[in-house]
Image (cartoon, rainbow, N blue to C red):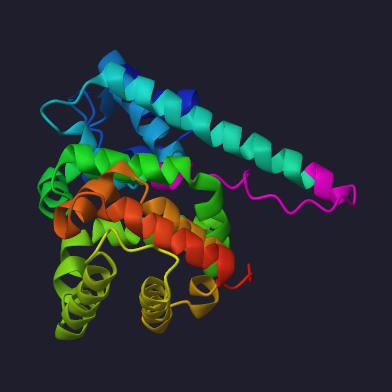
Amino acid sequence: MQTISQVAELTGISTRTLQYYDEIGLLKPSELTESGYRLYDDEALQKLQQILFFKELGFKLKEIKEILQKPDFDRIKAFKRQKELLLLKRNRTDRLIQLLSRLEKGEHCMSFKEFDLSDYITALEDFKNNSTDDVIKHWGSIENFDMFIQKIKDDESELAKLAIQQFGSIEKYTEAMKHNLEHFSELMDTQLTEEVKEIGKQSDILYGRLTADLSEDVSSSKIQSIVQEIWSFIQENSTNVSISCSKSHMNMLINAYSNDYIKSMTDSKYGEGASDYIVKAFRYYSENNASENN
């Protein structure tokens, strides 16, 4: 057994912090002496170690408490996951340092691969594990959500570039996305306004017209006119026009319809082969009409 002062000296955590952990039920002492002094055994110290790892990864105390209190919490699995996350964090920091070293030497290096989305992807994985019902409700299945996450991993560099353009930094983008995930059900309920529903209806009509006859040549004026309508519709209803008008955003849209998850949903709605047809129509438009702005 160790006293609270000994634990504070061992860990570098103040006695007041340990007292606070006790008060909020995060880390209770193993025993109390007759005089009311807190004592901690090895098991308590292991729990404290786990808490500190979670804190290092940016978890809030409330979140840590909820994780540790789960009936199926596995300490060894948690250590392995924490190690993976810390390695991702270290690798990301190393890449940023390397980029800064090149920039301070005066190199013109407009690179975005260093700004990875590891934190956001981790948040998505946590959301999947902790909000299964919401995932199934809005994505259809866990498998569909896994494909959605894989799509983000596949397009990480491009998405990082757009995230920086729109939010100013990966950190701000990740914070915004984490907030959305934390309030997902609430946001989904509030966003389903009549206006949003109407936008969805109009979108369905446009894509329905585009895929009405899959034998039509995608280069025909009829099909390209519909693609133009869709593209204008996207721009008009986007919250960030500069991104919507860029060719890189058009390419992301093309890539999205090549994703297995989006493809299966699109084919289910508009018919087998509809997703491939949309890709061909968009690609032709991109190569011949879309803005070159980036």
Q: Which residues are magenta?
A: 101-121
Q: Position of residue 201 (x, y in %)?
A: 17, 77
| Residue under the image location 40 percent in, 84 percent down | 236
Vertical order, 136 against 202 (above or below): above
Q: Pick whichever, 288 or 41, lies toward us.
A: 288
Q: Looking at the image, how many numbered discs can be counted on the residues?
A: 0
Q: Is residue 112 magenta?
A: yes
Would residue 127 be visible to someone looking at this image? yes
Tell me which secondary structure the magenta stretch mostly adopts.
Answer: loop
Would residue 168 be visible to someone looking at this image? no
**Is 256 positioned to the left or the right of 268 in the image?**
right
Image quarter of the N terminus: top left
Q: Is residue 138 magenta?
A: no
| Residue under the image location 53 percent in, 55 percent down | 170
Vertical order, 176 against 48 (above or below): below
Q: Pick whichever, 172 or 248, lies toward us.
A: 248
**Is 245 positioned to the left or the right of 63 in the image?**
right
**Is 140 positioned to the left or the right of 65 in the image?**
left
Q: Quadrant of residue 175?
A: bottom left
Image quarter of the C terminus: bottom right
| Residue under the image location 14 percent in, 42 percent down | 141
Q: Pick whichever, 210 or 49, lies toward us.
A: 210
Vertical order, 236 against 23 (above or below): below
Q: Position of residue 5 (x, y in %)?
A: 41, 28
| Residue under the image location 14 percent in, 33 percent down | 70
Q: Position of residue 209 (x, y in %)?
A: 24, 73
Q: Quadrant of residue 219?
A: bottom left
Vertical order, 38 against 226 (above or below): above
Q: Pick whichever, 98 or 146, lies toward us.
A: 146
Q: Residue furthest right?
A: 105
